[in-house]
Amino acid sequence: MTTPDITFYTVGTPNGVKVSIVLEELGIPYKVREISFQKNEQKEPWFLKINPNGKIPAIIDHSRGDFNVFESGAIMIYLCEHYDPEGKLLPKDPNLRSQVIQWIMFQMGGLGPMQGQSSHFNRYAPEKIPYAIKRYSDETKRLYSVLNDSLEGKEYLVGNRYTLADAISYPWVRAHFLSGIPSINEFPNLKTWIARIDERPATQKGLNVPTPDKVKELTDNPEKLEEFTKVAQSAFKFKSVEEEK
Ligand SMILES: N[C@@H](CCC(=O)N[C@@H](CS)C(=O)NCC(=O)O)C(=O)O
């Protein structure tokens, strides 16, 4: 196995911490380069060479000829393919591996985009659009119910052990209250699954990269939510259709 030498471009969001959690689980050394959303660094030409889509997370693997990888799910798979020789997080068995990849696709194509929109329309949008709020909150909850049902009688999603299938959705579900879903009490399996993953030392390390875990801070101090929303709104300068005219 090549000795890893990785630069990790990130911000402490669910998509960012997915990757730091995996880096920590696999014990891969990495350098962190925090990206400033305030300065819109993710859209600067130098960063677009690393991720043409202008979003975090991204990595450069210097030990493999400065190979760059973008899209959080692709980064997680890449890290396992090169630095998880035992298949700890991405099983070698083809059927288990397929099941893990199915949950990766579920998160990347479903939960992430839907919860992201739920978050946007519930919290950040300069116009309150009831239809959009309801559509994305309902779909996010439906996806939570899929996870909850799949966890019935099980500790983890695939093969009775913690894998990328769990690591990829966990940072999103724990941030539900930032996405217009104040409680997940109706999903008891999800609640215990979150608590189980919380206990992993690598989870706690990963959640605090590159900055202290915001979701935990806001869970403990809900009075800070409004200020947090304002900071994000000002970073992205969202404008209503009227303001755009
Ligand atoms: N599908 C992408 C989504 C990445 C993404 O949405 N990143 C957000 C932060 S969580 C971002 O960089 N937003 C800044 C922007 O869009 O300019 C992935 O999973 O990597």
Image (cartoon, rainbow, N blue to C red):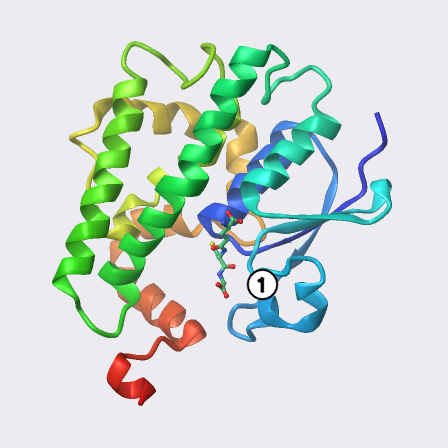
Residue occupying the point 17% across, 69% down: 128
Q: Is residue 97 visible?
A: yes
Q: Residue 14 vs residue 11: left or right?
A: left
Q: Is residue 243 above or below residue 120?
A: below
Does residue 47 sit above or below 150 in this rendering? Answer: below
- List x then y, in percent, for residue 132: 20, 59
* Residue most extreme to the bottom: 245
Q: Nearer the viewer, residue 204 or 174?
A: 174
| 212 vs 164, nearest the viewer | 164
Report the side of 189 relative to 163 (left or right). Answer: left
Number of callouts in the render? 1
Q: Is residue 15 above or below residue 191?
A: below
Q: Amino acid at mark 1?
A: Gly
Is 69 placed left or right of 177 in the picture? right
Q: Is residue 82 above or below residue 136?
A: above
Q: Does the image show residue 190?
A: no
User: Which image quadrant: the N terminus?
Assistant: top right
Image location of residue 228, percent across then percent down: 35, 64
Residue at image coords 45%, 10% = 160
Cβ(mark 1) to ligand 1 < 8 Å?
yes
Circle 1 sits in a helix, a strand or a loop, which is it? Answer: loop
